[in-house]
Structure formats: structure tokens, C-alpha cells
């Protein structure tokens, strides 16, 4: 009798642990994806992630058809649908890859229990990381809460065994021959097209492959280029890592074998990803709480009007506004900018990091609970290995340093396009004549700054000291 492969954040056919093990079982394999209403409920109709998944599944279906298989796509609660599908197809076992987010762990436990009642096993595998859960531990057997020793241990433990790809293609003839499967439209799923099609964001398996090939040409310059948002420095693979349209083993293998400063720095970023995943695994309470309990109840004043200005990109600080508009318009934000806007929200606007974390979770196409929580807690100084609370980014000097010509700012704040580079980072300091020449009236065409950095800096220090 057939077996099911339940796809979740692993939307590819190559180097896929669960698919490999299912195919090797010798039984016909039925790949399934459930648009899970437990996750989708509450998302806006034009959520880019839903469209990304939908487009990726379309590509996956085409590939499966080429190999004589098909993709079963359903809509509803996964905890109910997976046991129902088992009955419908007379399945003997279910295969899936590990997911480390607390709600996913709970979901998988519920499914495993429901299946066990029918005498069916849920087999799960490590797939989305090189090292998972408690595979990299300190000498005393504890989790790492500081990145550098974690990275050292991660690299020391790395060998060919952990990087070896699963040779899925060899076994694809085991795919079940199914009657033609219906593929729902976005509308039938309760969603609509977003602006994903207009963005330069390649989707699905093909998109992941294309972006990775492009990045391989640039990887040697990664360490120098990655901090400048107007430059094509990073890989833009985060959404593909999120939904598993690329294999992390393949990426890590390339970076590890390629070597050099660029590839080493990039491999470090992949290790940061796993660092935060193991933090979430060991300390799931970080989802709602500061990693350092003494910072959990910081008395943030949380001004709602300032929060709205931050969300909408109208704080009057061009680098912050351009970054937030990038997020709102594209669902992506450059890493340097994520650090700048997060620091600005917490330490200039004195707003609880959880508010910013939630906003990012809604908007980021690459939203990943572990990385997002880790990034926010790092910026807010509440996290493990975070930056100390007294280190406060100055948004103007960050802007001068990382977008010196204002190229990035001008892309997202076109109203500032006529300002000369030296004036663009802090327009309120410009001479009235200069502003006039650029055709800008502050407070009319572009906002005046909503706070004064030097004043807020002192307020943040006092708040944290308290
Ligand atoms: P590259 O520079 O090419 O890096 C390669 C990959 O390494 C990324 O795709 C990502 O998977 C991983 N990575 C890089 N930096 C980090 C990091 N600091 N922590 C964990 N993983 C990292 N990343 C997410 O994937 N999802 C999030 O929700 C997310 N939220 C963030 C929130 C804040 C406040 C901050 C400061 C960072 C956040 N990051 C998040 C990390 C980082 O900003 C993005 O991974 C990166 O910008 C994605 O672009 P890229 O794929 O071009 O990155």
C-alpha cells in the first residue's frame, strides 16, 4: 500500500530527506501539500507567501508529472486532513521533515497521535538544517547561547556525512501513478494575486536554482558587499530557505568547498540561521519573552502614533523610511536595514521589540520564527549574544556609512531624489535654500523627524538601566 510524503517547508524534489526515505520504502509514494487553515487564517488576501507557495507547488506538480507522479493538494486543517488522506488512499505510513517551531511541533504531535490510533506511523527526518536540535552542544552538554563558540563547534563537527545529498532522482519511478489531481486556484483558497509577479523575485525550484547560480558568481565579494543595501551583495535566498525550494546542504557544501573570505562569511550566515533554530528548540519561550529574563518587563512607553509612523515609513529618518517602504512594497528588507529599523524602533522610539517582531512576521516573505525572533532580540539587547543595551545605532551615521550616496533611499523615497547626497541622511539639518532647490518642504513633502536621536538615546539608556 502507498505511503504519503507530507510536504511543508521543503518544496523541492532533489536532496529531500523525507521524500528519499519514502521512495526507498519500496511503496508507491504520494506527495501531499495541505494549505493549512490553522496557518492561513488571518492572513491578508494578497499575502505574498501564499502566492510564493502556490507558484512553487505549481512547479513541483509539473516536475512530478514529468516523472509519472502527481501532487495531491488540499485545503483545510492539516491535523484533520492528513489522517483523512491516509484513509482515502489506504496509506501505510506518512513521511515528513522536522519542523522546529513550537506550533509545528504541536501540530505534528497531534497528527502522529491521530495516525497512531489507526496503527500508522509518522516518520520524520532532519532536512532543513545541517545540524538540528541538540546535535551541536557545548563540552558540558548544554546548548550554546553565544554564536562564536557555536559556530566553532558547528564547523568542527562538519564532515561529508552531514552534507551528503539524498539521491532522490534515482528512485522517482516509485512515485504513485495517480488519477489526475486537481490543483486549486488562489481564489479557491481564499487568496488573490499579490504584487509578487511585479517584483524581481524568482519563485519555486527554478527561482531558487537561478538565484543560487547568480549568487555563486558574486560569492567572493559577499563579505565586502553585503552591508550596502543599494548593492547586489547578498544572495536573496532567504525565502527559498524558508520554503525549502533550495537544499541547505547544497548551499552549505558549495560555500564550504569554495572557501575564501566571501564564502566563509556567507557560511557563517547559514550557521546563524541554525544557531537561532537551536535556541528556539531549546528555549521555545523566547517566542513571547526576552531570552534574558531580566529584560522581559522593560517599561516601554509604546507610543502608538510613533509605531504607525515607523510601520508606514514616515518617521522623517530617510534610511528608516526607505527600509520600511521596501518591506511594505516587496516583503523583503536588506539585513543591514533590518538591524537599523529594529534598533530605531526599540531604542529611538522606545517601543517593545515584540511589536516590531510581529510587524515583520506579517510582512516578511522570508519570515522565519527563529531568525526573526533572534534578530529582534539581538537588536533589542534582550537576546542571547545580543548587542549590549548601551550600543545604540545612530540612524544618520548608519545611513552615511552604508548608503553614502543615498541611492537606496532615493529608490524608496523618491520625494528626496533631488537632494544632494550629503543632505539626504538628515534633511532637517539642510539649509532652507538647499531644500528649496530640491523642491522639498519638510513637513509637507517629507516628514520632519518624529524624534531627536540624542534625546531618545538618553531615554533608552535610562529605561534599560532601570
Ligand atoms: P544572505 O546574506 O545571502 O544570507 C544567506 C542566508 O543566511 C539567509 O537567506 C538566511 O537564511 C541566513 N541568515 C543570514 N543572516 C541571518 C541572521 N542574522 N539570522 C539568521 N539567519 C540568517 N532572516 C530570515 O530568514 N527570516 C526572518 O524573519 C528574519 N528576520 C530578521 C529580523 C531582524 C530584526 C534581523 C536583524 C534579521 C532578520 N533575519 C531574518 C536575518 C537576515 O536579515 C535575513 O536572513 C537576510 O537579510 C536575508 O537575505 P539574504 O537571503 O539575501 O541573506
Image: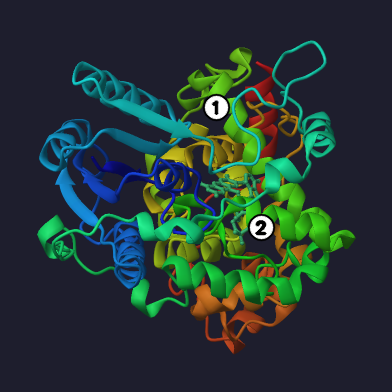
Q: Which residue corresponds to the image point at 11% horizontal and 40% vertical from the top-left?
A: 88
Q: Residue at label 1?
A: 280
Q: Compare residues 311 and 38 and report the one nearer the observer.
A: 38
Left or right position of 156 against 446? right
Q: For the residue with label 2, is its CB less than 8 Å from the closest atom of ligand 1?
A: yes
Structural crowding at the residue carrying mark 1, measured as other residues with C-alpha within 10 Å and reported as few (<14), some (14–19) or many (≥20): many
Of all residues, the one furthest to the right in this rendering is 260
- Reading the chain from its start, which is encountered first: label 2 or label 1? 2
Q: Residue at label 2?
A: 251
Q: Which residue corresponds to the image point at 36% horizontal and 69% vertical from the top-left?
A: 63
Secondary structure under badge 2?
Answer: helix
Q: Quadrant of the N terminus?
A: top left
Residue 74 picture location, percent across and down = 17, 50
Q: Quadrant of the C terminus?
A: top right
Q: Is residue 329 above or below residue 150?
A: below
Q: Is residue 189 above or below residue 159?
A: below
Q: Which residue corresponds to the image point at 62% horizontal and 74% vertical from the top-left?
A: 408
Q: How many numbered circles are shown? A: 2
Amino acid at each position: 500500500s502507498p505511503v504519503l510524503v507530507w510536504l511543508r517547508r521543503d518544496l523541492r524534489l532533489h536532496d529531500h530527506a523525507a521524500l528519499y526515505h519514502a521512495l526507498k520504502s519500496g511503496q508507491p509514494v504520494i506527495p501531499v501539500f495541505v494549505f493549512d487553515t490553522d496557518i492561513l487564517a488571518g492572513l491578508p488576501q494578497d499575502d505574498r507567501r501564499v502566492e510564493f507557495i502556490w507558484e512553487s507547488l505549481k512547479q513541483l506538480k509539473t516536475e512530478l508529472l514529468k516523472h509519472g507522479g502527481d501532487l495531491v493538494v488540499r485545503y483545510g486543517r492539516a491535523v484533520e486532513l492528513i489522517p483523512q488522506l491516509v484513509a482515502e488512499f489506504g496509506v501505510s505510513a506518512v513521511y515528513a521533515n522536522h519542523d522546529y517551531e513550537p506550533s509545528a511541533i504541536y501540530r505534528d504531535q497531534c497528527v502522529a497521535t491521530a495516525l497512531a490510533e489507526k496503527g500508522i506511523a509518522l516518520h520524520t527526518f532532519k532536512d532543513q538544517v545541517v545540524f538540528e536540535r541538540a546535535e551541536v552542544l557545548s563540552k558540558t552538554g548544554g546548548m550554546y547561547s553565544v554564536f562564536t563558540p557555536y559556530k566553532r563547534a558547528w564547523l568542527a563537527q562538519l564532515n561529508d556525512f552531514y552534507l551528503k545529498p539524498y539521491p532522490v532522482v534515482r528512485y522517482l519511478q516509485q512515485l504513485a501513478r495517480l488519477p489526475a489531481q486537481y490543483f486549486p486556484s488562489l481564489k479557491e483558497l481564499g487568496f488573490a494575486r499579490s504584487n509578487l509577479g511585479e517584483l524581481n523575485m524568482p519563485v519555486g525550484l527554478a527561482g531558487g536554482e537561478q538565484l543560487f547560480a547568480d549568487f555563486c558568481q558574486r560569492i567572493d565579494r559577499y563579505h565586502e558587499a553585503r552591508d550596502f543595501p543599494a548593492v547586489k551583495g547578498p544572495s536573496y535566498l532567504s525565502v527559498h530557505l524558508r520554503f525549502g525550494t533550495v537544499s541547505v546542504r547544497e548551499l552549505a557544501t558549495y560555500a564550504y568547498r569554495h572557501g575564501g573570505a566571501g564564502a566563509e562569511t556567507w557560511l557563517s550566515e547559514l550557521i546563524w540561521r541554525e544557531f537561532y533554530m537551536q535556541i528556539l528548540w531549546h528555549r521555545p519561550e523566547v517566542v513571547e519573552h526576552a531570552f534574558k529574563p531580566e529584560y522581559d518587563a522593560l517599561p516601554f512607553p509604546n507610543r502608538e502614533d510613533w509605531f504607525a509612523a515607523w510601520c508606514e515609513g514616515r518617521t522623517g529618518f530617510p534610511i528608516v523610511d526607505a527600509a520600511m517602504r521596501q518591506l511594505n512594497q516587496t516583503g523583503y528588507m536588506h539585513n543591514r536595514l533590518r538591524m537599523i529599523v529594529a534598533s530605531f524602533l526599540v531604542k529611538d522610539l522606545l517601543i517593545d521589540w515584540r511589536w516590531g517582531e510581529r510587524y515583520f512576521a506579517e510582512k516578511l516573505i522570508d519570515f522565519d520564527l527563529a531568525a526573526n525572533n533572534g534578530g529582534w532580540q539581538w537588536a533589542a539587547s534582550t537576546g542571547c549574544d545580543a548587542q549590549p543595551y548601551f550600543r545604540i545605532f545612530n540612524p544618520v551615521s548608519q545611513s552615511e556609512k552604508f548608503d553614502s550616496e543615498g541611492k537606496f533611499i532615493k529608490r524608496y523615497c523618491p520625494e528626496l531624489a533631488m537632494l544632494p547626497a550629503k543632505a539626504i541622511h538628515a534633511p532637517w539639518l539642510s539649509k532652507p535654500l538647499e531644500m528649496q532647490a530640491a523642491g522639498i518642504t519638510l513637513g509637507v513633502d517629507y516628514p520632519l523627524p518624529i524624534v531627536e536621536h540624542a534625546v531618545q538615546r538618553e531615554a533608552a539608556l535610562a529605561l534599560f538601566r532601570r
